[in-house]
Amino acid sequence: RIERVEDKVKWLGDLLGKLGEEKVLVITRTRELAAEVLEELVSATGAKGVLFHEDLTLLQRDRNAAFFAEEEGARVLVCSEIGSEGRNFQFARHLVLFDLPEDVDLLEQRIGRLDRIGQKGTIQVHVPYQLGTGDEVRVRWLEEGLDAFRASPPGAAEIQRELRFDLDEAIGEREGIEDLIEKTLECRKRISERLARGQDRLLERSSHRPERSSWLVGKIREWDEDTGFEDFLMRLFEYSGLHIEELGSRRYFLLPGNLKSDAFPALPAEGMSVTFERQRALVREQESFLTWDHPMVRGALDLMLGTEAGNAGFGVWDSAGEKIILLEAWLVVECVAPARLHVERFLPQTPVRIIVDHKGGDHTGDPTFAKPPLRKGDGASLMRNDKVKRVFLPAMLEQVRLLGEGRSSDVIEAALQTMREETSAEITRLKSLAEVNDHIREEEITALEARQGELEEVIRGARIRLDAVRVIWKAPAT
């Protein structure tokens, strides 16, 4: 065994010499073999390499993976089978399978570590083996019988189960490989044809909508390039008590610092690196990619929106004319419903802005009041006036409630209309398909009609909630 490992390591050293400075991922079955391979490789060639296996801590694995990802970092990463699951190394294009997995599905997992979104080259799979051994039989079976190094063979696991004894016999006896390959090709053809007959062609034809897809891609790119989101989020994190260190362009290191709550369970005590660049995050898994739906972002938003901090304010509007008190209110139209209904598709939490004055005037639709030029002021002095506090504000709040209910009715009706159109179209489509496609069951149509009725009921039950208020003192500048 030692001689075989040494021979493979010598071959690996020669391969590194031929590949120049390209990075190489080496996968073995066990952590012991991975450590042995790296030790002998470094001793023989002096190559810069790191290990990646289950005995390392998560922090050590992250550091080694990051070092492998750096342009001037490790050239070789030698990992055990754990390295073929969950980690992506699409910046490399050379994969060495130092030994082969017994399960053919694991082969797909191994190759998939490089064959990911962001891979810009053709992946080269290198498989060393000795002639006249069981390794040769397995390699030829995978290459000539399954073509598993170039593509994922349909039904590979089923083929392996069906030919298990033939494969074991060929490996043990070192003969009968030609018969095994012939049986494999026949079995592969038969299973592929059966799987093809089970495809739903209509579903495949209607699944991809290029115009919609292009629109989504454009929107995602807009969000990725939105520096306003980055600025807002860093200020929000700072407000929440996080310690922030800038690492580079659109890259930061976050530490717990002086947190105001436990709203960030995803933040480890040792901190985490984050980035706003999607391509960088794809290559460096140790850097979290921040988007609106990231747990850290959602935690910060929940902290801001779910507490009293920031939901009331005061401003002064220097403007000619009479002195008036304005109340700007944000209400939310929300619907409480079981998660299985996904009611947010039709009626998400919808903000409604209302602005009234102390005389009963409604200025919501007046563009002059849309974005008033406010400055900071002392609201306490205004609140010391008992008439303002006991008469004007309660009356203004009541008017806001009445106006909000009227506005919410329009929002609810629009949601109902959208829901009816979409669900009715889907019901009609399923009924039409049921006439020509026996894959459509009556129970599916009945369930969809029942869901339409439930959605009607819960959307009609939507209510408004006062979310935030701001008192504005509008008066000539003093």
Image (cartoon, helix red, strand yellow):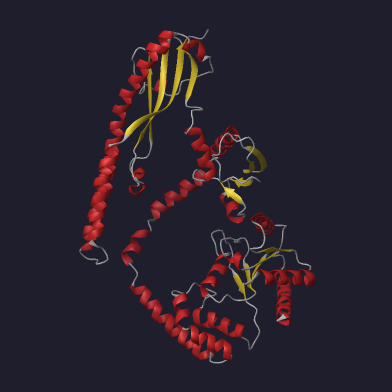
- Residue 321, compared with residue 81, is above or below; it is above
- Residue 21, compared with residue 191, is above or below; it is above
- Residue 448, compared with residue 156, is above or below; it is above
**Residue 204, quarter of picture:** bottom left
Q: Nearer the viewer, residue 51 or 74?
A: 51
| Residue closest to the far left | 435
Residue 262 percent coordinates (x, y): 55, 39
Q: How many marks?
A: 0
- Residue 134, compared with residue 195, is above or below; it is below
Name the side, left or right, on which 409 lies relative to 97.
left
Tell me what residue is drawn at x 33 percent, y 20 percent: 398
Is residue 322 visible from the viewing direction of this image?
no
Q: Quadrant of the N terminus?
A: bottom right
Name the side, left or right, on which 418 lies relative to 65.
left
Residue 266 percent coordinates (x, y): 56, 46
Name the side, left or right, on which 357 lies relative to 419.
right
Residue 474 percent coordinates (x, y): 45, 13
Residue 313 percent coordinates (x, y): 49, 22
Q: Nearer the viewer, residue 472 or 303?
A: 303
Is residue 449 visible from the viewing direction of this image?
yes
Tell me what residue is drawn at x 62 percent, y 60 percent: 91
Tell me what residue is drawn at x 66 percent, y 40 percent: 246
**Residue 404, quarter of picture:** top left
Q: Nearer the viewer, residue 263 or 342?
A: 263
